[in-house]
């Protein structure tokens, strides 16, 4: 390594990566996340009552995301089934029709996911979904979503029917004025936080 390299300034982070790190830090430091999550899930259920006549996907929360176990449990009690995603190779998501909360098992890194022994028996076509509840790192008022950078949910959103209702659960601190979308990005119809249900796009 030459003297010029030693004295050169550090690389400037990509704007999206810098924003991602800022929002993740804000989410980690947010107090009372469990209480806030419950408020968000209650607000979601009031705005979007789930019935047996529609098929819904709800993400299984990890780390500091809005917690969804209570939402999953309540949906199972009300409807008898809820679709949950799980990771596949090549940054794809598989979809599993969950019938009991006990069918979620701790997998890699201690993350809850559908029991691998049951996955081969049950498959859900993304085109069959009527509503998709997704996480994210950040959102803007137009529904543009900043993910974790791997593209799992971006790919899934691209496989849904255009009329499938897309709803994000987020803490208020995850809302920002603008997120620059990529051509392939698909915006949310609604964002539900502990303070508001924000309509972003006509459903």
Image (tube, rainbow, N blue to C red):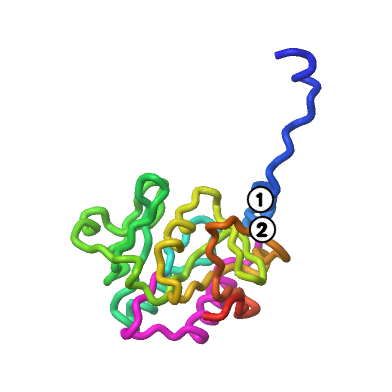
Q: Position of residue 179 (x, y in %)?
A: 67, 60
Mark 1 secondary-structure assignment: helix
- Identify the residue at image location x=39%, y=52%: 92
Q: Position of residue 130 (x, y in %)?
A: 39, 77
Distance (Cα) linking label 1 and label 2:
8 Å
Judged by depth in the image, the label closer to the viewer, 1 or 2, is: 2
The mark total stands at 2
Of 85 and 105, the residue lying toward us = 85
Residue 143 % position (x, y): 60, 69
The residue at 66%/58% (across/down) is 180
First to last magenta residue range:
29-57
* 131 on left or right of 28: left
Give the image location of residue 125, x and y in percent: 30, 66
State yes or no: discs 1 and 2 in contact (Cβ < 8 Å).
Answer: yes
Q: Residue at x 43, y 75 (%)?
A: 164
Residue ranking furthest to the front = 183
Mark 2 is surrounded, within 10 Å at the Cα level, by few (under 14), some (14 to 19) or many (20 or more) other residues, namely few
Packing grade of label 1 (10 A; few <14, some 14-19, many >=20) is: some
In the rendered view of the protein, which quadrant contains the N terminus? top right
Instruction: Report the front residue among 163 and 63.
Output: 163
> In front here: 99 or 135?
135
Q: Which residue is mark 1?
A: 16
Regarding residue 102, the answer to whether it shows in the image is no
Magenta span includes 7 = no
Numbered disc 2: secondary structure: loop
Q: Which residue is mark 2?
A: 180
Residue closest to the eye, 2 or 63:
2
Question: Which dot marks residue 113?
Answer: none
* Residue 30 magenta-highlighted: yes
């Amino acid at each position: 390594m030459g003297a010029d390299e030693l004295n050169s300034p550090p690389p400037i982070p990509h704007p999206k990566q810098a924003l991602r790190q800022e929002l993740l830090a804000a989410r980690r430091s947010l107090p009372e996340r469990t209480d806030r999550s419950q408020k968000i899930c209650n607000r979601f259920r009031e705005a979007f009552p789930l019935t047996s006549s529609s098929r819904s996907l709800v993400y299984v929360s990890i780390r500091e995301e809005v917690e969804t176990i209570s939402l999953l449990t309540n949906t199972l009690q009300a409807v008898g089934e809820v679709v949950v995603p799980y990771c596949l190779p090549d940054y794809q998501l598989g979809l599993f029709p969950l019938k009991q909360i006990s069918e979620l098992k701790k997998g890699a890194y201690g993350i809850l996911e559908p029991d691998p022994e049951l996955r081969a028996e049950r498959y859900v076509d993304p085109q069959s979904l009527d509503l998709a509840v997704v996480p994210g790192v950040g959102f803007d008022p137009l529904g543009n979503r900043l993910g974790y950078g791997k593209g799992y949910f971006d790919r899934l959103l691209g496989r849904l029917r255009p009329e499938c209702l897309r709803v994000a659960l987020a803490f208020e601190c995850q809302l920002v004025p603008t997120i620059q979308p990529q051509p392939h990005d698909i915006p949310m119809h609604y964002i539900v936080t502990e303070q508001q249900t924000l309509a972003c796009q006509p459903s």
